[in-house]
Image (spheres, rainbow, N blue to C red):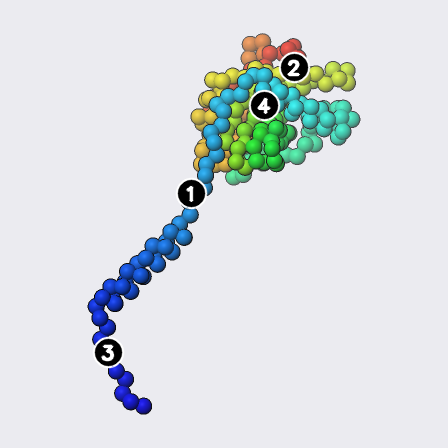
């Protein structure tokens, strides 16, 4: 076998290969870099009162169906609803009832989730109603985007008939509550850090959320439509 020859390569060929390698690196880098995930469209700041009442009315209907089916019409069955414990806290579990995917075009895609948190009864209220703080979460693009309404709903059993009392919306309380939310956590209602407490105030019932200092009230004797 004859001796191998190391022939010199012209300088312009080195430059050509370097240019090709640089172009390939740019193309590969462009393929590896993905466009950011599109964000959901901004949610409505507030729902109209009529729209909120319609959604809460559907939540009431589903809750009444549950009471009739699981408790033979006795609201005491609410104590058997699944309890959810906040992650990372020692706070007691909470009882929620939710009506999901209202007015949604597909499950979890859009529409509204209505969640009701059953508040602990008043210590001196043997005949006090069951009081829920009910939040409406708007969904867009398969994710929750905002809490658009919060109000109180009371449920009483009058001679075997369910009687509902629906509180008014309070935009200032809602704004105070939303401003205290931790936006680094997934949006949900109720949030893990929420601390709702039912109390008497003047001639009505009130629910204070201690983390945000927001308060909602419910005048007794005003049946829901």
Which mark is first along the chain, 1 or 3? 3
Please state which of residues 106 and 85 is positioned toward the viewer in this rendering: 106
State whether residue 11 is above or below residue 151. below
Q: Is residue 99 visible?
A: yes
| Number of other residues with Cα within 10 Å of mark 4, as a class: few under 14, some 14 to 19, many 20 or more | many
Residue 91 percent location from the top left of the image: 55, 33
Work out which quarter of the rendered image holds the N terminus and state it: bottom left
Residue 224 numbered tag: 2
Q: Which residue is mark 4?
A: 133
- Badge nearest the viewer, 3 or 4: 3
Residue drawn at point x = 66 percent, y = 14 percent: 225
Q: CA distance from mark 3 to mark 4?
A: 85 Å
Q: Secondary structure at mark 4?
A: strand
Residue 116 percent location from the top left of the image: 61, 26
| Number of other residues with Cα within 10 Å of mark 1, as a class: few under 14, some 14 to 19, many 20 or more | few
State whether residue 138 is above or below residue 12. above
Please state which of residues 80 and 151 is positioned toward the viewer in this rendering: 151
Q: CA distance from mark 3 to mark 1?
A: 50 Å
Q: Secondary structure at mark 3?
A: loop
Q: Which residue is mark 3?
A: 7
Which mark is first along the chain, 1 or 4? 1
Which mark is first along the chain, 4 or 2? 4
Which mark is first along the chain, 2 or 1? 1
Residue 36 numbered tag: 1
- Badge nearest the viewer, 3 or 2: 3
Quadrant in which residue 201 is drawn: top right
Please state which of residues 212 and 200 is positioned toward the viewer in this rendering: 212
Please indicate whether residue 7 sits to the left or right of residue 196 in the image: left
Q: Secondary structure at mark 2?
A: loop
């Amino acid at each position: 076998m004859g001796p191998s020859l190391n022939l010199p390569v012209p300088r312009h060929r080195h430059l050509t290969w370097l240019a090709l390698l640089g172009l390939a690196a740019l193309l590969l880098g462009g393929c590896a870099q993905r466009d950011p995930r599109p964000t959901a469209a901004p949610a409505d700041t507030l729902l109209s009162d009529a729209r909120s009442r319609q959604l809460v009315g559907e939540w009431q209907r589903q809750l009444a169906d549950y009471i009739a089916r699981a408790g033979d019409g006795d609201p005491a069955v609410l104590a058997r609803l699944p309890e959810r414990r906040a992650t990372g806290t020692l706070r007691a579990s909470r009882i929620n009832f939710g009506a999901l995917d209202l007015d949604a075009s597909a499950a979890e895609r859009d529409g509204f989730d209505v969640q009701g948190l059953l508040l602990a009864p008043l210590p001196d209220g043997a005949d006090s109603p069951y009081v829920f703080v009910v939040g409406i979460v708007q969904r867009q693009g398969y994710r929750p985007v905002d809490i658009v309404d919060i109000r109180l709903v009371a449920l009483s059993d009058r001679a075997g008939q369910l009687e509902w009392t629906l509180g008014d919306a309070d935009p200032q309380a809602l704004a105070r509550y939303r401003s205290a939310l931790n936006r680094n956590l997934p949006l949900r209602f109720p949030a893990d850090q929420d601390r709702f407490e039912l109390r008497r105030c003047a001639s009505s019932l009130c629910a204070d959320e201690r983390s945000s200092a927001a308060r909602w009230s419910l005048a007794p004797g005003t049946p829901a439509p």
